[in-house]
Amino acid sequence: MKKTILTFTMVLSALLLASAGVKPGDDAIKFSLKNVDGTTVKLSDYNDQKGVILVFTCNPCPYANAYEQRIIQLHETYAEQGFPVVAINPNDDEISPEDTFDKMKAKASEKGYPFPYLKDATQEVYRAYGATRTPHIFLLENKGGKFEVAYIGAIDDNAMDAASVIQKYLEKAIMAVISGNEPNPATTKAIGCTIKSKG
Amino acid sequence: MIYEIVILELQLKVKIVYIIWYIENKKHLLTVYLIVKIYMVIVLFWFLNFNQITGQTIPEIDRDGLAMITQKSNDTTYVVNFWATWCSPCVKEISYFEELYRKRAESKLEIILVSLDFPNQVDRRLIPFLKEKEISAPVMLMTDLDYNGWIDQVDPSWTGSIPATLIFNSEGRLFLEQELTRDELFEYVNLILN
């Protein structure tokens, strides 16, 4: 009996996990969030771009920090090709005090973020996307004014050392989108910090 | 042993210095002798201590090694916890795994703590952490950084956040991508054990 209940619970949780968030091919979720410069940034602000590299990231996570320079570099390389970075901090700052809006501002100015760094204050955006860790990438493709999810997952295959990267998963996906193909793989997984939330 | 050779070399150098001093200052023979001896003792202690800190190694594991553990099917129940020193919820729950390890009455329960710390932080962070927290449960360092290549192999439902814990034996399997309380951990383990 216990085993049956266990199996049932596992299937149920698997279903719940599967239903949460977007997958490649789905419509992107619209958002309108406060940026560290005080302005409000919406997905529709990027209607004239080919796509958006949406990055769920945060201040203290060592993985986010290991990728920070690479994320800046990605923006510098791909913004001019029509794929700017938009960073969103999804953490509840009561649980993660390093992620307050003020500390986000400090981080963005200290590191000279060339892209918006938005606060998902209600945590609705990360939940809608189904982001589970930081950093977690969602590559969005602009299909005639309507954004679609093209790729979900990791930036590359070596968080510790950018110089040792073999597979640049995200850049490969961007290249695929630019040349009109579907990214393969369209999803990858990576170890990251949990997104801090109360429930 | 390498350090023995280094010590011999150091002793030789010290002797040369000692001879030069001896020739120059015959009068202060005893002083020089004492200084040299003290210096040698300090060097010896420093070196042994240094060796003790850096000499500890953590067994390393790659995706094949991990697969061998997570696909075991025998009469033992395995608890495999994925964690890192930088992950605060992991650090919070690690003492429960240690308690489970110390309390296990029979040897049919194995606990393995798979560290996802970066391999370049083992000496600086992982080993000092394990000493400070007095962790005696087996720890292994995952050295395969292409996470996408092995996350699904542990469990297809795992999105990659840690802490994550796999509890299994030949009859049941439970994968938990969440932080566990002490009671939850013990309950889940009992559920699989019985």
Image (cartoon, rainbow, N blue to C red):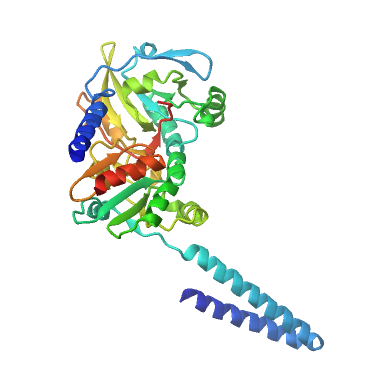
Inspect this view and state whether residue B150 appears. no
- In the rendered image, the vertical position of residue B69 relative to residue B89, given as above or below: below
Q: Quarter of the image holding residue B17?
A: bottom right
**Position of residue B153 measured from the top left corner of the image (x, y, whole percent):** 23, 44
Nearer the observer, A47 or B33: B33
Where residue A169 sits: x, y (%)? Answer: 29, 36
Left/right placement of residue B48 relative to residue A19 reads: right
Task: Note whether residue A132 is visible.
Answer: yes
Q: Quadrant of the C terminus of chain A?
A: top left
Residue visible at 69% across and 77% down? Answer: B38
Q: Position of residue A76 (x, y in %)?
A: 42, 28
* Residue closest to the eye, B127 or A146: B127
Of all residues, the one furthest to the right in this rendering is B27
Query: Residue A15 versus residue B24: which sits nearer the camera?
Result: A15
Question: Which quarter of the rendering shows the N terminus of chain A?
Answer: top left
Residue at 27 percent across and 35 percent down: it is A188
Against A110, is A145 above or below? above
Q: Residue at x 42, y 37 (%)?
A: A67
* Residue A45 relative to residue B34: left or right: left
Nearer to us in this view, B37 or B156: B156
Question: How many numbered tags mark residues here?
Answer: 0
Residue A117 spot, x, y in % from top left: 47, 23
Question: Would you identify the image quadrant in which residue A194 lies?
Answer: top left
Q: Is residue B145 above or below residue A68?
A: below
Looking at the rendering, which quadrant does residue B72 occupy?
bottom left
The residue at the point 30 percent across, 35 percent down is: B159
- Which residue is situated farthest in the front direction here? A1
Whether residue A79 sits left or right of residue A176 in the image: it is right
